[in-house]
Amino acid sequence: MAWQNAPTLTKLTASQQGGSRGAQLWGVDFKGTLYTIYQVTPGGAWSGWLGPNWAGGGAPKQVYELAAAQQNNGCVQFFAVDTKQQLWSVSQQTPGGNWGPWVGPGWNNTPKGLAFRKIAASQQGGSRGAQFWGITLKGILTTCYQITAGGKWSPWQDWPQTPEKSRWIEVTAAQQNDGRVQLWAIDTKQQLWSCWQNSPGGDWTGWSGPKWNGAPPLSNIAACQLGGSRGAQIWGVTEDYTLVSDVQISPGGGWGGWSIGSWVNTQVYDVTAAQQNNGCAQLWAITLKQVLMSVSQISPGGEWGGWS
């Protein structure tokens, strides 16, 4: 049985919420129909599944790709790419509260002809809000960021290239429990690269890679900030659909190395993760049989419970 009796989903994203709620998960089915479910209290029970009108009318009719992040003010912003590769977005009006109107297609004055096939977003620290990344149809990574928490967004600009002038197939990002964001991306050779901020909301390092921290060839990735004494965690799906992971031992510090063997005793192809507003992270994965599974930490930055 799927986690929380989920519909048959093909893609996922998740975000921690603010206020009195915990986390929120979104997914789409093979028809592009958007669904969501939210945690009623931090680390607590979940609502029932909601359909495309969860944020009111005006949503894109068919969704291809999705991402979400808090805006450094407790309010979540959700992003969706429709089947025409057009970008849409909707934001909460209060932390853990109701949602405003949809903006799109062409959110944030997306330049004409700029179409996305993969997207990612992360909350930033410092004086900024969130940052968004998109991979274009040509495999170029482009970005914009929120100048202030919950405020206006910067113009679009291409992300600096790697020494190999990589083209990209997948991207993810997360804070490192010290206010700084780390970004990961998979190139067309299935090599993992990474870069990170030097200060919360500040400048970025150059790319580290290929095969960042000894990563195996990967086809999918997801990352999440951890609580407690840890920093962040990244999960990856290998060529044979094995789920592997690497953990940051301390906030903004070194990494423990990639896991040996699978995180779950089945093959998976899509993953996402988020904190639950109590310091404990939760991970979701879709199996090759399109069954949604999930596992949560028992304590902030600590051990994990069993899969459900």
Image (tube, grey):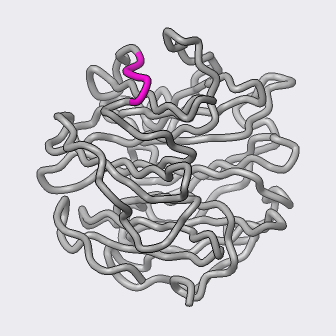
Which residue is located at x 69 percent, y 77 percent? 8
Residue 279 shown left or right of residue 58 in the figure: left
Q: Nearer the viewer, residue 29 or 14?
A: 29
* Left or right for 4, reference 124: right
Residue stretch rendered in magenta on the structure: 207-211
Depth check: give the residue in front, 136 or 148.
Answer: 136
In the rendered image, which quarter contains the C terminus? Answer: bottom left
Is residue 226 within the magenta segment? no
Image coordinates of residue 206 in percent, x first then y, are 39, 14
Q: What residue is drawn where x is 29% and y is 53%?
A: 259
Across and down, in percent, residue 256 comes to 19, 44
Q: Quadrant of residue 255?
A: top left
Q: Position of residue 137 (x, y in %)?
A: 77, 30
Q: How many marks do you count on the picture?
A: 0
Tell me which residue sits at (33%, 24%) in the image.
Answer: 197
Q: Quadrant of residue 120?
A: top right
Residue 222 vertical placement versus 181 (above, below)? below
- Find the residue positioned furthest to the top: 163
108, 220: nearer the viewer? 220
Is 168 drawn above or below residue 205 in the view shown? below
The location of residue 54, given as percent across then percent down, is: 68, 71
Query: Looking at the rendering, in which quadrant would you find the N terminus?
Result: bottom right
Rendered residue at 62%/16% (across/down): 157
Q: Is residue 247 above or below residue 153?
A: below
Secondary structure mostly taken by the magenta-highlighted segment of the chain: loop
